[in-house]
Image: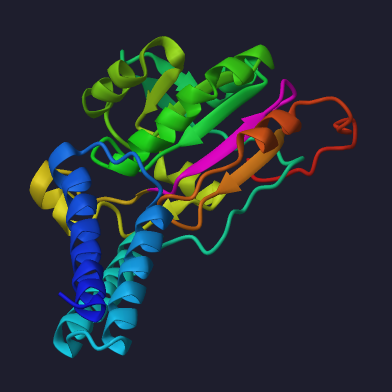
Amino acid sequence: MDIGSALTLSGLVLVLGTAVAYLVLLFVVHGFTYRTWIFHAVEALGIGLAAAGWLAGGSGLVAALAVAIGVLWFAVTWHELRLVGSSGIRVRPGDRMPAFDATTTGGIPFTDADLVSQAPALLVLYRGWWCPSSKVQLDEVLSNHAPLNAAGIAIFAGSVDSPAESEPMQQYVGAGFTILCDIPVSLLDTIGVRDTRGAPWYDRLLFGAAHRDISMPAAVVVDGSGRIRYAHRSTQVDDRPKPAEILASVGRGIDWTRPAHPGPR
């Protein structure tokens, strides 16, 4: 086999293999553990190899197939990773934490006052029990539990899921932090993190996810006065806040003595 043919075939195998691996992680393992940009990079490499092989005299058909699959990959993932709903986050540091009523997986009522009483507190909002990227989101919180805990930050994670739906998530994170359930859509609207598309059709079909509005991945840090110190809303499903930013929001050298912006309440 000449170099051109080897390159085009390698490119096609890489493009196909990457797409298959991504789908297996999502729908078979249901434990997605990698950032999507890594798959994007490998797909782009596969397309590049196929194109280079074609220029070196390899099969134009094989190269065209690799490019077509790669382009389809980018189009589909771009569509599926986007968040549909709120145009932007509506709270900022200094605003009051919006009022809300939720429950724990044990059915115990939990409100914004409970959150503030344990401040500084981090509230992570995730899409739902059915979403592999939500597990990655919570995994990242768990991996940073030690420095967050050392900074005195109480950690909570919530979604619109019911207690029964959320119980596996609480078991998944263990004693690392508390899972909150029945987060009201009104809170998502007030913060500006409401995703009106909800669970994709394939998650509803394969996993039985409910068709309802959900939260975009987000994180809010609240202090003891009920003011927001940090607020982050993801722009894509696999976008995450930086742990260093969360820690800095409760660190020294930040002036939190200024009057609070009234914010939504």
Residue 182 in view: yes
Residue under the point 27% across and 73% down: 70
Estimate the x, y position of residue 181 in percent, counting from the top left.
Answer: 35, 28
Q: Is residue 217 magenta?
A: yes
Against 46, residue 227 (above or below) is: above
Residue under the point 17% across and 49% down: 203
Residue 82 in view: no
Against 263, residue 168 (above or below) is: above
Estimate the x, y position of residue 213 in percent, counting from the top left.
Answer: 32, 51
Stretch of the chain drawn in magenta:
215-226
The one nearer the camera, 8 or 174, is 8
Quadrant location of the C terminus?
A: top right
Against 172, residue 27 (above or below) is: below
Estimate the x, y position of residue 127 in percent, counting from the top left.
Answer: 36, 43
Place residue 55 in its image quadrant: bottom left
Place residue 139 in its image quadrant: top left
Place residue 46 in its image quadrant: bottom left
Single out the residue that lies furthest toward the left: 205
Q: Is residue 210 magenta?
A: no
Residue under the point 51% across and 43% down: 218
Colour scheme used in the picture?
Answer: rainbow
Q: Viewed as shown, does residue 144 lie left or right of 176? A: right
The one nearer the camera, 62 or 103, is 62
Single out the residue that lies furthest toward the top: 175
Quadrant location of the N terminus?
A: bottom left
Residue under the point 41% across and 48% down: 35
The one nearer the camera, 207 or 146, is 146
Estimate the x, y position of residue 89 in percent, counting from the top left.
Answer: 59, 54
What is the total number of numbered labels drawn onto the structure image? 0
Q: Viewed as shown, does residue 83 lie left or right of 87? A: left
